[in-house]
Every structure is written in C-alpha cells, then in structure tokens.
Amino acid sequence: MKQIQIIDAKHHVGETVQIGAWIANKRSSGKIAFLQLRDGTAYFQGIVVKNEVGEEIFQTAKNLHQETAVLITGEIREDSRSKFGYEIGIENIEVVGESNEYPITPKEHGTEFLMDHRHLWLRSSRQHAIMQIRNEIIRATYQFFNERHFVKIDPPILTGSAPEGTTDLFETDYFDQKAYLSQSGQLYLEAAAMAFGKVFSFGPTFRAEKSKTRRHLIEFWMMEPEMAFTTQEESLVVQEEYVAFLVQSVLDNCDYALDVLGRDRSVLEKYTKLPFPRISYDDAVKLLNDNGFDDITWGEDFGSPHETFIANSFDQPVFILNYPKAIKPFYMKPHPTREDVVICADMIAPEGYGEIIGGSERATDYEYVLEKIREFGLDEKEYEWYLDLRKYGSVPHSGFGLGLERAVTWISGIEHVREASPFPRLLNRLYP
C-alpha cells in the first residue's frame, strides 16, 4: 500500500492509501467521527463511519486526543465542501504516538503563552500557513536571483568588523581575539561582487538591541545582493522587481495559506504593480510636518508612526531616498551635489509594517572611505581589506538587504514579526 502526503491527495482519488498524520481536532456525530488531520504539507478531513469500520476502530477514533500521531489507511475522495477539495474515508487507524493534555487547545490563548510554547505553537494551522509563505519567499528568492545570474555567496557569521556600527554587536572571544556575530554580510559581498559581478547571500544576522516592539528581532534572516557596475537607480529597479516577484509568487503558490490567514488578495495584488512610488527624505519630513507630526525634524531618523503615515500616503511600498549622512553607515556614497546626504534608499511597506529593505550605492573613493572609517572610530587595520577594494579595480556598485521575517510578516498580514520566526531562539528569549 502506498504511503502519501496530504498535499498529494488529488493524485490518488479513488485509491486506498496510508498517511502518517497528527490529530489537529476532532468531532463526532452519532455513528460518524470527523478527524482534522495534518501531516506538515496540508490539513484535510478524515471520516470514520462506525458501520464501515466496526466498534473497535470507531472507539479508537472517538478516543483520540489532540496531537496524537497516527497512521491512517483509507480511500481518497473529492470533497467539494472544503477549500482543500479532498478528504479520506478512513478504514483503519494505528496509533503511533499518544498525546495527552496538549497545552494549546482550540480556545484563545494570549501571545505570551503562545511564545512560551512556540515549539508546539508551530504545529497550528496559522503558524503552518505562515511557514508555508516563508518557505515560498525563500524559494522565490533563489529563483529570482538565479534567473538573473547572481552567484550565491555565504559570508562568515563570526566577523572581525562591523558594517552597521559598533553599538549593537554581540561580542565573543575568538581564540584571544575579539569577534562578533554578523550584523550583515554586505562588506564581504562587496569583495565577492568584485570577483563575480552580481552576488547574493541569505543567512542569519544579529542585532544586540533590547527591543520589545512587534517589529524587531535579535536574530533574523536577511537576503543581501551586491551588484558591480550598478548605480543606485539601477538597484532600485532590482529591488522593486524583487519585492513584486515575491508577492506574486505567494499569490500564485500559497492560496491555502492565504485563506487560513484571511489575507486579502486584492491588497497584495496592488503590491505587484510597478514602479513603486518614491519620495526624498526632505519631502518625507515636510509631508509629516504638514500633517501634524511635530516630533520629527530634518536630520532625525523616522519612527514607526512616521513610516506608517508615509507608506499609507501612497498605498504601496514606497522608497524614501537620500537620508542625512549623519544617520547612515560609513560605506554609503556621498551625494554628488550635497554634503549633507548620501545616496541611499529605504523601502517602506504599507499597512504599518515599516522598512523592509535598506540599500545604497557604495562609496568608491579610497580617501573618502578611510576618512569615514576614522570618523566612525573604527579600527583601520580591521578594514584594510575593505579599503583594498577601492585600490584594485574599484567600480560603481550598489546593494541592499531585505529582512526575511519582516517581509513574511507584511506579506502574510500578521501582527508580530516574531510569528514569522520559526523557533524560540535563545537570543529572542533573552530580550522578549
């Protein structure tokens, strides 16, 4: 007998198969029991009819507890009443692993309780849907960049230098030397771009910031491309095409997950229309001031309420261009006609989700980068290799970073970025 996964049920209609699954929920009505089954690929219903299976199997079905692991044998049937479209008429049930007093019941639970039980919360239909969307975004990312001839590069996770400043680094001892958990792979990717032209990385990054907002994580995954012979304007086109591609891929391949989350597809479809609007930092500050925001002045970074208002003014992801030099990292290229700003952009997602991409054109002048390293109080010796990139065949180049968890949160339409993170990592629990 063939063992299949629930997601492949449509290929086995009329066949008797076996499925390994867990009991997500159950109900019974007289001589019929309805089992909600999940196996990690999808959810669907199993039906047990007493007159067809006998007393022993029927009682087994009625006595199953939530999250009991079972091997189900039965016939796959079409089910036009369900969104999944198929069900299984159960003939036999083999209990593989008992489950008693499972703590996450179908009733409402608070976020704190669920976070404390995330190792189990991951099994819920909502978390399952979020992870399906997360998986699709990762798959689509590789497709997007592979089709455009980017080379995947894996920068080190332990580094000796900091691209984003030294105030939020996790420091560790590396054989009597100081090392840090990576904030970003960007500096290493700049070196790789000088070898391969177009590169990208996708890996974990760390920020030692004590944050209790719904939009921040201590550990998160970031997708970072770096492109040689590429101006900021050309990079912005790649960024908007990439984000629109991710959204369209979720629309095309995550229909069931979007249903579970109640995500409005018409809203997501707006985010596939290009080009995305753009506004300068100068005009963004003016827009805020003209609309009653007196808590922001030129030279300050935007907070969550500011980003939300700006993005909602356009009802699409929006680029904010050319921030003040004083609030951006040392590696960004200075503006050709202004001393006070750099050539950079943040992409702000609508619906209150904030920044999902940060990017810039990189400074290429050796003396300028050296001056900025000194100005930021960084160790010149640690950045000698980075300065070498400005000495040997330097070219205009640009790049950006997209935070995976933030993007999943936005596209899924969920409230907490932590929901989009798959496991209760130690660092997230130190600073909840």
Image: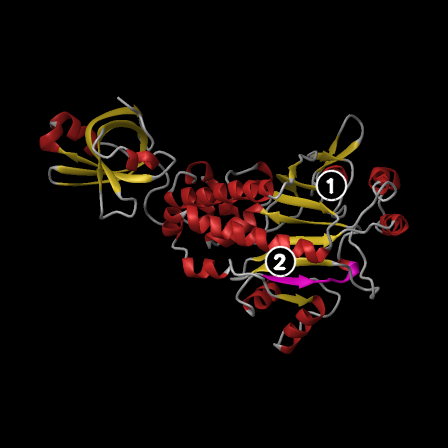
Q: Position of residue 295 (x, y in %)?
A: 67, 70
Residue 242 visible in rendering? yes
Q: Looking at the picture, does residue 159 appear above or below residue 81?
A: above
Q: Position of residue 201 (x, y in %)?
A: 64, 39
Mark 1–mark 2 distance (CA, rounded to whole Å): 23 Å
Which picture quadrant has residue 350? Answer: bottom right
Which label is found at residue 193?
A: 1
Pointer 2: residues within 10 angstroms few (<14), some, or many (20+)?
many
Q: Looking at the picture, does residue 312 appear above or below residue 83?
A: below
Q: How is the image coloured?
A: secondary structure
> Who comes first in sequence, dot 1 or dot 2?
1
Left or right: where does residue 402 sit relative to residue 301?
A: left
Which picture quadrant has residue 428? Answer: top right
Q: Looking at the picture, does residue 280 appear above or below residue 149?
A: below
Q: Position of residue 70 (x, y in %)?
A: 29, 27
Q: Which residue lies under the disc numbered 2?
A: 347
In magenta stretch: residue 325: yes
Quarter of the picture holding the N terminus: top left
Q: What range is drawn magenta here?
A: 318-326
Q: Position of residue 288 (x, y in %)?
A: 64, 72
Left or right: where does residue 27 sit relative to residue 405?
A: left
Left or right: where does residue 379 sit relative to residue 54?
A: right
Residue 356 visible in rendering? no
Residue beneath the point at 60% across and 59% down:
348
